[in-house]
Image: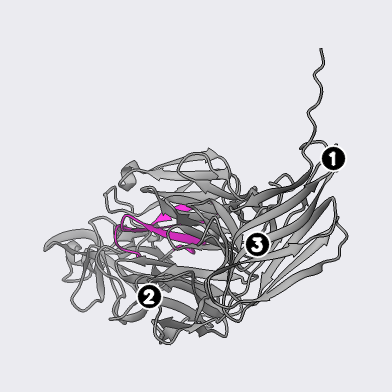
């Protein structure tokens, strides 16, 4: 038995929207989602609102990097600037930073900056002819084959340094890496463990008249050619600090420095304070690293590696095949809302220590470049076509504008360095430094995806009502595109009076579907939309 169809209601019905779900570029997104936007934010979600104005801190000529370590640091060309004051000169190239115990470390220059000593190199190299390898003393006792003495300038090394020796021709076995145990008071003699160096009797010859074998051993072997002693630092392509060590990667190799000592990377004695180096044996170079959830975490494009352990003897590198950081996008790593976010081959992903999962589908595009920062709860990421913000509390994406970031850091606010050299303070910082210049009035734009009033006809819009709050003097415009015509028609324009919310009513033409574009020359908030829809007699409900 077939029941009769109930008659469809005829006349006006209302459809209200009071929650706006941020950017949504996917075709399968909700009807009426926002497909394009400019200068909007989630600060008043679920309402739609323009972002707060940024503050301009400085303008650089050649932006080469920015970081914050309790101080605001940037590099303009070759000038290192700390809290607004130039403190030294570096090479004119993009920089990577890390901070260890108040020391600012800068790659690829491989230097360290402290207010007390200024800029000093992490590496030390000493080259001289006629270096003498001989027996000497250690801890006040005679020791065989343990000393190097120079007749020239003092050695630039200190106790505990791992030095690599090269250039020995009379005794090639002495080309090695060894640990300095003592340095003479005048700095011209380095002492190592006994039998570190080979001193064969046949090389020394017969004892001279009045010379004993012991004194001959003390005379040792003098190298006629130039010999180089070097304390080297790897050319790290990325770096982070974890548990009082600097960690980094070069190609397929993972490194960490000696405990608390960023000048020593070649000390391997079996002690808990040693440096560490290992190759993973997996294809491709590393693309990013960060200290997260109590581990140094390294990334390749298709792998994530966590390093377990508390000392080199029990360090263990555990890798898993999963979405890693896209090549060239190590700067996209940032922690927001207790989760790690970064750009992978599949877009922006969220990582909590297990399997990363995509969260950037609403952006609707593939991206190849990224740099990010965080204010704690919001993930700011500069992608190919502009700056996007993920609010981790509401999980909404918003696009700000076309600015490109090349550096970020937190110091009582999220600072960012743009590709055109501006140092900006983003968001709503708790402290604005003296002399910062606000942007002024910021207008925003929201362009909605197509809004359908009936899948099979019989319904069409009559009126649109908007609940608005527009800043005094700002001009707010509503434009409509009917039935995918490609023509945007201005429906209304209103000037803000600064007197709280107001309601604007707009008559609409009959159509199957439409798109809506809202824009303003100054700050505005949209609290709700109400569509008045007319349904014809006999129209199918949907």
Of discs 3 and 1, which sits in the foreground? Answer: 1
Question: Residue 537, which numbered label?
Answer: 1
> Residue at point 41% right, 85% down?
84
> Residue at point 30% right, 46% down?
310
Of discs 2 and 1, which sits in the foreground? Answer: 1
Image coordinates of residue 403 in percent, x first then y, are: 62, 72
Q: Which residue is mark 3?
A: 466
436, above or below 139, in the image: below
219, above or below 313, in the image: below
Of discs 3 and 2, which sits in the foreground? Answer: 3
Q: Is residue 106 in view from this perspective? A: no
User: Along the line of sight, which residue is nearer the eye, 363 or 438?
Assistant: 438
Crowd class of label 1 (few under 14; some 14 to 19; many from 20; radius 10 Å): few
4, above or below 186, in the image: above
Magenta residues, start to end: 234-263
Q: Which residue is mark 2?
A: 431
Crowd class of label 3 (few under 14; some 14 to 19; many from 20; radius 10 Å): many
In the drawing, does residue 366 fall left or right of residue 330? right
Farthest-out residue, left: 140
Q: Secondary structure at mark 3?
A: strand
Q: CA distance from mark 3 to mark 2?
A: 35 Å
Picture quadrant where residue 382 is located: bottom right
> Residue at point 82% right, 36% down?
540
Q: CA distance from mark 3 to mark 1?
A: 28 Å
Q: CA distance from mark 2 to mark 1?
A: 61 Å
Q: Secondary structure at mark 1?
A: loop
Q: Quadrant of the N terminus?
A: top right
Q: Earlier in the sequence, mark 3 or mark 1?
A: 3
Q: Quadrant of the C terminus?
A: top right
Q: Is residue 324 magenta?
A: no
Q: How many marks?
A: 3
């Amino acid at each position: 038995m077939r029941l009769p169809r109930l008659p469809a209601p005829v006349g006006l019905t209302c459809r209200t929207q009071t929650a706006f779900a941020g950017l949504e570029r996917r075709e399968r997104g909700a009807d009426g989602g926002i497909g394009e936007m400019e200068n909007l934010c989630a600060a008043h979600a679920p309402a739609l609102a323009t972002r707060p104005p940024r503050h301009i801190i400085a303008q650089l000529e050649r932006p080469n990097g920015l970081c914050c370590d309790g101080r605001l640091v940037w590099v303009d060309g070759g000038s290192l600037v700390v809290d607004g004051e130039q403190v030294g000169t570096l090479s004119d190239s993009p920089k990577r930073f890390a901070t260890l115990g108040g020391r600012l470390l800068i790659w690829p220059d491989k230097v360290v900056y402290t207010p007390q000593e200024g800029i000093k190199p992490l590496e030390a190299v000493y080259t001289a002819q006629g270096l003498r390898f001989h027996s000497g003393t250690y801890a006040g006792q005679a020791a065989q084959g343990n000393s190097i003495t120079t007749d020239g300038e003092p050695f630039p090394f200190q106790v505990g340094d791992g030095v690599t020796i090269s250039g020995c021709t009379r005794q090639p076995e002495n080309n090695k890496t060894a640990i300095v145990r003592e340095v003479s008071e005048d700095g011209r003699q380095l002492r190592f463990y006994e039998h570190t160096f080979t001193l064969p009797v046949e090389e020394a010859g017969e004892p001279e008249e009045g010379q004993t074998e012991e004194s001959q051993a003390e005379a040792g072997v003098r190298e006629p050619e130039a010999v180089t002693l070097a304390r080297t630092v790897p050319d790290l392509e990325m770096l982070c600090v974890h548990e009082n060590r600097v960690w980094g990667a070069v190609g397929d190799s993972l490194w960490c420095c000696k405990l608390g000592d960023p000048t020593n990377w070649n000390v391997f004695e079996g002690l808990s304070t040693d440096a560490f180096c290992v190759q993973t044996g997996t294809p491709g170079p590393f693309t990013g690293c960060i200290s997260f959830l109590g581990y140094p975490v390294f990334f390749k494009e298709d792998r994530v590696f966590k390093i377990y352990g508390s000392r080199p003897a029990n360090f263990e590198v555990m890798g898993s095949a999963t979405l890693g950081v896209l090549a060239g996008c190590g700067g996209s790593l940032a922690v927001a809302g207790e989760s790690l976010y970064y750009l992978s081959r599949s877009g922006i992903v969220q990582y909590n220590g297990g399997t990363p999962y995509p969260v950037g589908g609403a952006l609707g595009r593939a991206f190849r470049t990224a740099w990010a920062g965080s204010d704690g709860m919001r993930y700011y990421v500069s992608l190919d076509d502009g700056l996007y913000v993920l609010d981790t509390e509401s999980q909404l994406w918003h696009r700000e504008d076309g600015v490109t970031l090349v550096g970020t850091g937190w110091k009582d606010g999220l600072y960012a360095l743009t590709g055109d050299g501006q140092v900006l303070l983003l968001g709503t910082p708790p402290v604005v430094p003296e002399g910062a210049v606000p942007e002024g009035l910021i207008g925003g734009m929201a362009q909605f995806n197509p809004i359908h009033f009936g899948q099979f006809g019989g319904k069409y819009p009559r009126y649109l009502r908007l609940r608005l709050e527009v800043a005094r003097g700002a001009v707010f415009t509503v434009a409509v595109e009917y039935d995918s015509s490609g023509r945007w028609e201005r429906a209304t324009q209103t000037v803000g009076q600064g007197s709280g919310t107001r309601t604007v009513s707009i008559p609409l033409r009959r159509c199957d579907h439409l798109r809506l574009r809202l824009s303003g020359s100054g700050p505005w908030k949209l609290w709700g939309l109400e569509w008045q829809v007319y349904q014809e007699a006999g129209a199918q409900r949907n």
